[in-house]
Image (cartoon, helix red, strand yellow):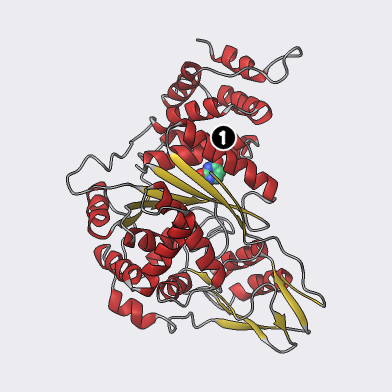
């Protein structure tokens, strides 16, 4: 096989500008030899650009996902005596105030499923589940595979980061896509996300594909294309999968930050969570439970999830997980409602009207406050964040405290407050918004 022939096959020509479908062997040849260092960056870059313009069929995307998946470790969670049952995970394309994994995992585990969660860290304007968990004193968000299995067996869910051995092809390809203008390709995004999720050992996957200013996909149409590709490609790989399209034009919940989002998670598990967070959590939970056969229908799944809040089981499991992963549960519960950065400002409404709050700008401001990172080696600050006293659509009066803002130091307010002021709009008439949950693709 010659690399240039594979590139031109995908690129096409004047008679066939769409190019042709690559075979499983051709795709494996490219990925294996790129990872071994036998194919140079410039040839893979040309192939990535051909894929960017001509796309891939679901079968090709599935073959690419499979080749990437086998570039590193594939975790077999079933291959142990202590771990039984169905494994189900969810993946979110990321957003602002998106702490859904934190209440969702214990709720679904309390219903009897196993939830092996491998999450990421904050980057850009979106937060990261692992940074949030690391704000719990003592919590270890990096587990080795034996520890991961142990925690999963003991409390039904475990939280860790991806190791370097999971899908090394994705790290290489992503770095190249980043500098060749080929990140925004639906089949490449699909293979990147799916290869990591399948390598982590789940039988069933539920995707929370967000649309809006604070999302990776800005429009509902773009989000639907990605969701459709994720679900169809997963089905081609014989995985159960579905996707929910959810709104990320405004932050989720009322708390944005690292410890602040842990605090909001506890409120959710105590039955006092914000409606938007609970609605998305129950919808994803119900999908997960139907996939593993623990719920007869979506509606039955929602009821089962709600029950785990009222009977206290989900909170019990969350605290058990914190303890198993080294966290101090007494200090955690004592900190709720109290642990705040000493650097604080209030943002006051300047006029009467209806509030809208842009997710992207709020996310950028939170990075300046110290919640997230601009570069992968930046530090994050556990106690930085924002408490929203009013949310999108609320009626406000001049003088109302719209939000409390907590920073890593005094200086960070110089950059973050102007961004936040810019994220806020108060209008005479209520702005029409797209629904929180737009549709489900199965
Ligand atoms: N997230 C991923 O994991 N991969 C992509 O390519 C884009 C978003």
Residue under label 1: 188
Residue sitting at the far right: 428
Where in the image, quadrant-wise, is ligand 1 located? top right
Residue sitting at the far bottom: 399
Residue 438 lies, in percent from the top left, at 63, 55
Disc 1: residue Cβ within 8 A of ligand 1's nearest atom = yes
Residue 192 lies, in percent from the top left, at 50, 38
User: Number of marks in the image?
Assistant: 1
Between residues 412 and 52, which one lies in front from this camera angle? Answer: 52
Residue 301 lies, in percent from the top left, at 43, 58
Residue drawn at x 64%, y 75% as measured from the top left: 391
In the displayed structure, 368 sits above or below 428; it is above
SS of the residue under disc 1: helix
Between residues 44 and 192, which one lies in front from this camera angle? Answer: 192
In the displayed structure, 282 sits above or below 64; it is below
Residue drawn at x 63%, y 47% as measured from the top left: 223
Between residues 341 and 73, which one lies in front from this camera angle? Answer: 73
Residue 119 in sight: no
Residue sitting at the far left: 81
- Give the side of residue 310 with respect to residue 94, left or right: left
Q: Label 1 neighbourhood size at 10 Å, few (<14), some (14-19), many (20+)?
A: many
- Give the side of residue 76 with respect to residue 126, left or right: left
Residue 155 in sight: yes
Residue 76 lies, in percent from the top left, at 28, 39
């Amino acid at each position: 096989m010659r690399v240039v022939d594979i590139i031109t096959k995908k690129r096409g020509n004047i008679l066939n500008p769409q190019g042709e479908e690559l075979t499983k062997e051709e795709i494996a040849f490219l990925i294996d030899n790129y990872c071994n260092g036998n194919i140079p960056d410039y040839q893979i870059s040309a192939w990535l650009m051909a894929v960017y313009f001509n796309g891939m069929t679901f079968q090709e995307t599935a073959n690419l996902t499979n080749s990437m998946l086998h570039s590193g470790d594939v975790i077999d969670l079933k291959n142990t005596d202590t771990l039984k049952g169905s494994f189900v995970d969810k993946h979110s394309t990321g957003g602002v105030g998106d702490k859904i994994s934190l209440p969702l995992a214990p709720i679904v585990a309390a219903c009897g499923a196993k939830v092996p969660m491998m999450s990421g860290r904050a980057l850009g304007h979106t937060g990261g589940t692992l940074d949030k968990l690391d704000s719990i004193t003592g919590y270890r968000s990096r587990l080795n595979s034996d520890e991961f299995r142990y925690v999963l067996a003991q409390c039904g869910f475990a939280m860790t980061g991806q190791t370097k051995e999971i899908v090394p092809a994705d790290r290489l390809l992503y770095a190249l896509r980043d500098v060749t203008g080929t990140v925004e390709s639906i089949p490449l995004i699909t293979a990147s996300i799916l290869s990591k999720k399948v390598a982590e050992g789940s039988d069933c996957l539920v995707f929370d594909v967000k649309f809006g200013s604070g999302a990776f996909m800005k429009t509902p149409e773009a989000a639907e294309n990605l969701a459709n590709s994720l679900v169809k490609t997963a089905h081609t790989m014989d995985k159960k999968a579905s996707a929910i399209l959810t709104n990320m034009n405004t932050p989720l919940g009322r708390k944005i930050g690292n410890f602040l989002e842990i605090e909001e998670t506890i409120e959710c598990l105590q039955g006092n969570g914000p409606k938007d967070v609970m609605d998305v959590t129950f919808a994803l939970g119900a999908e997960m439970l139907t996939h593993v056969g623990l719920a007869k229908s979506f509606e039955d799944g929602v009821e089962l999830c709600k029950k785990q809040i009222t009977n206290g089981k989900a909170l019990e499991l969350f605290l058990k997980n914190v303890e198993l992963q080294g966290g101090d549960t007494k200090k955690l519960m004592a900190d709720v409602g109290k642990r705040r950065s000493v650097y604080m400002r209030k943002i006051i409404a300047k006029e009467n009207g209806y509030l809208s709050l842009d997710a992207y700008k709020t996310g950028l401001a939170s990075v300046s406050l110290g919640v997230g990172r601009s570069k992968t080696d930046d530090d994050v600050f556990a106690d930085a964040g924002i408490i929203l006293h009013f949310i999108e659509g609320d009626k406000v009066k001049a003088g109302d405290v719209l939000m409390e803002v907590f920073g890593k130091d005094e200086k960070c307010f110089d950059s973050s407050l102007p961004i936040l002021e810019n994220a806020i709009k108060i209008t005479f008439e209520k702005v029409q918004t797209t629904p929180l949950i737009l549709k489900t693709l199965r």
